[in-house]
Image (cartoon, rainbow, N blue to C red):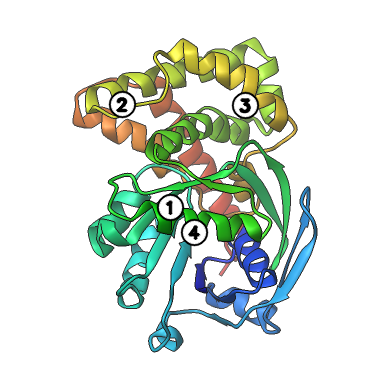
Amino acid sequence: MNILVFGLGALGTVYAASLKAAGHKVYAITKERYLKDLGSGKVRVSGIWDSREAVLDGIFTDTGPLLEKEIDLVILTVKSFDTAHAVRQIKDLVKGDTLVLISQNGYGNYETASLVLGREHVLLARVIFGARIIEVGYSEVTVIADDVKIGQPDEMVEEKRIVEIADAIRRAGIPASYARDVYGLLWDKILYNCALNPLGAIIGCSYGTLADHEGSRHIMDRLIDEIFEVTGVHGIILRWESPQAYKDHFYGKLIPPTREHYPSMYYDINAGKRVEIDALNGAIVRLAQEKGIQVPVNETITDLIRTKEAESLRRSSPVS
């Protein structure tokens, strides 16, 4: 396949290096400030999977050089606050049988891409492995809780094609499989991230530490309860009968294999980067406001992260 990975952060680097090493033609889009460090085109991955490295077929800052190429698959891995901009950039590449795989955190990315590109071109991935950037072009996979699950929430793409893409990613060394209920699985991930990511970033601790302490468990329980209330009034179908059923799975099955993991939001704030709170707890707040529901714990967590983010960005900005 001819593949474009849009965004060479931790996740995008894993996709790009793995798929290129597996024999696909792989291009990437990155930000201007990273281009110099990626001049050789080399990307590499280490960590809990086999190490792999590859030289990509082209790394660019926009899609202009790719307009004459037939792109089979675009994998979108940018942060959620860059989704709208990225989707506008790739619009002219998406034609015929081109598919775009939304491989991001949070709520709203699939909806934004579908509105611009058409649902018949957009696939959704639930990603639940963790990776971190060691340096530009070099990513370390730190943890995995399940396969990358890939599907089309509105059944607008033939199942056979989705399975073929999942198989290609799996053969490249990234555990992946088809999932008809991918939207429900995405909401599982949203629940997981909303409970752990911002609180871990605020306190500065691992997932296991959050689960070990009564106070942080109480906060996570309240966050989960509020999300169930909001999704219920919006008619969003979760895969759990009750908040307690999800909590039993969350504490019993999800946290143990990832208990040493620190949230990506923690690393982003420490690095002076923007964070994805508006696609996580911030999205819950917006959905609640649409229905006149109060979600005080999600709102408080959102406000705290926005303050922490603002201070981090201020400290990292060069003094003029």
> How dense is the environment of label 1, judged by Cα within 10 Å: few (below 14), some, or many (20 and up)?
many
Q: Which residue is rendered at x = 45% and y = 35% of the image?
A: 185
Instruction: Specify whether 168 is left or right of 103.
Output: right
CA gap, disc 3 and disc 1: 23 Å
CA gap, disc 3 and disc 4: 28 Å
Residue 266: percent from left, percent from top: 63, 42
Foreground residue among 200 and 127: 127
Residue type at mark 2: give it: Thr
Residue type at mark 4: give it: Glu
Q: Nearer the viewer, mark 3 or mark 1?
A: 3
Residue 77 seen: no
Please tell me in which quadrant of the rendered image residue 146 appears: top right
Q: Which residue is rendered at x = 33% and y = 72% of the image?
A: 94
Can you tell which mark lies on residue 231?
Answer: 2
CA gap, disc 2 and disc 4: 32 Å
Which sits earlier in the primary sequence, circle 3 or circle 4?
4
Residue 258 seen: yes
Residue annotated with mark 4:
164
Q: Is residue 256 above or below residue 161?
A: above
- Element under label 3? helix
Residue annotated with mark 1:
80
Q: How many marks?
A: 4
